[in-house]
Image (tube, rainbow, N blue to C red):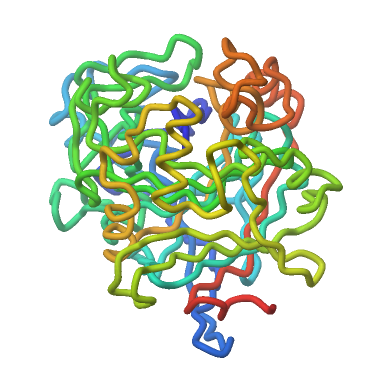
Amino acid sequence: MYRILKSFILLSLVNFSLSQKVGKLTPEVHPPMTWQKCSDGGSCETIQGEVVVDANWRWVHSAQGQNCYTGNTWNPTICPDDATCAENCYLDGANYESVYGVTTSDDSVRLNFVTQSQGKNIGSRLFLMSNETNYQLFHVLGQEFTFDVDVSNLDCGLNGALYLVSMDSDGGSARFPTNEAGAQYGTGYCDAQCPRDLKFISGSANVDGWIPSSNNPNTGYGNLGSCCAEMDLWEANNMATAVTPHPCDISSQSVCKSDACGGAASSNRYGGICDPDGCDYNPYRMGNTSFFGPNKMIDTNSVITVVTQFITDDGTSDGTLISIKRLYVQNGNVISQSVSTIDGIEGNEVNEEFCTNQKKVFGDEDSFTKHGGLTKMGEALKGGMVLVLSLWDDYQANMLWLDSSFPTTASATQPGVARGSCSTSSGVPSEVEQQYPNAYVVYSNIKMGPIDSTYKK
């Protein structure tokens, strides 16, 4: 995922800060959602789960009800430094439908793009839970992961992303006792961008060194970042899609500081312990411009079943990851990932040969190999990862890295630059939020099991 700094707008009482203490003004009631665990032969067991919204979206306040964070700045009285802020601030419960535009029904969840209530909410980031206080861990090495998705209402500049990250299953509360909220309140987020826009990380506030965003009145970044391995199963709108592994030197959640985080907020994007670019397979970028989109082979006007298979060298869940395969099912037809038509890059799987050749032909920095490639990604998958379901727009690069030509300074005819047919002038968040306020994504029918057990051939 070429995720830079995600954009989320929460005004007035709806501040996006990650608090460590628990408030009592709004009860936290997680929307229920089921998924299925499958066995060889295709029999599947329904598992009762629930979803929780990331603490970055929640109201965080003092004991007296004052905002700890307003707009893109901290309250200097309540939050003069990291430690004092963590002590003074309380994280409250969520009104999922009215404030965040999140609704569930049986095995599905719908995420609305713009929701107007006390303030204006943009998108959301959810985690699937096994119970009220713990995230569900998925061990997908040597297995496959399948879900249905409706991206028909996601236009250029939007990203409905479903992915796995190596978060602590309890949100970090055991490792960091100052985090009293834990997974129940959506704490502990991390990814391979080592994001520095999180307000609290590993039991500490991120006040010190905080710099408000220059183009987003609701975001900023501090000295600290939160790193972990990331497996992007799905990043898409109705014009483009990508599947992307992002390994890290240390797969589990860890804290970085300032430029050592890498990513967009640092002086060196590649200076951290994680691979911020990943090894992506985007059908359009790999030369097949007629594969994915409205009325194309994978028709984004209709619901799509997405199957991702994690193949190991010995066919077991204890082996070494050697390939990531993608299948689609639509209208009863099983459709393999499109095959690359780029000279010097062969196949339709994410494997070491593909990644090495792609970086060479496209002239991209090979941080994927530097951080351990598929082998290191497989170690993260084996350890268990948390499922993230999200919808967002992009204040840093207008999502052009997903659905347009990027970088915009390069010719679209240069291999690897064209990633989708959206205009290079598209994706500006202020315009996207005005033009597509009723956009939404629906994820449903999540399944995990042995290879070829979660879909019908």
The reply to whether residue 104 is visible in this rendering is: no
- Decide if residue 430 is on the left or right side of residue 14: right
Picture layout, residue 75 above or below residue 189 = above
Q: Residue at x 35, y 58 (%)?
A: 184
Picture layout, residue 155 above or below residue 457 = above
Q: How many marks?
A: 0
Residue 365, horizontal then vertical, whole percent? 37, 27
Residue 211, horizontal then vertical, whole percent? 32, 14
Question: Looking at this view, is 294 or 303 the one in front?
Answer: 294
Q: Residue at x 31, y 31 (%)?
A: 199
Residue 192, horizontal then vertical, whole percent? 34, 40
**Quadrant of the frame with the C terminus:** bottom right
The reply to whether residue 268 is visible in this rendering is: yes
Residue 261 lies in what quarter of the image?
A: top left
- Decide if residue 224 is on the left or right side of residue 356: left
Picture layout, residue 449 above or below residue 379 = below
Name the residue furthest right: 295
Residue 205, horizontal then vertical, whole percent? 22, 32
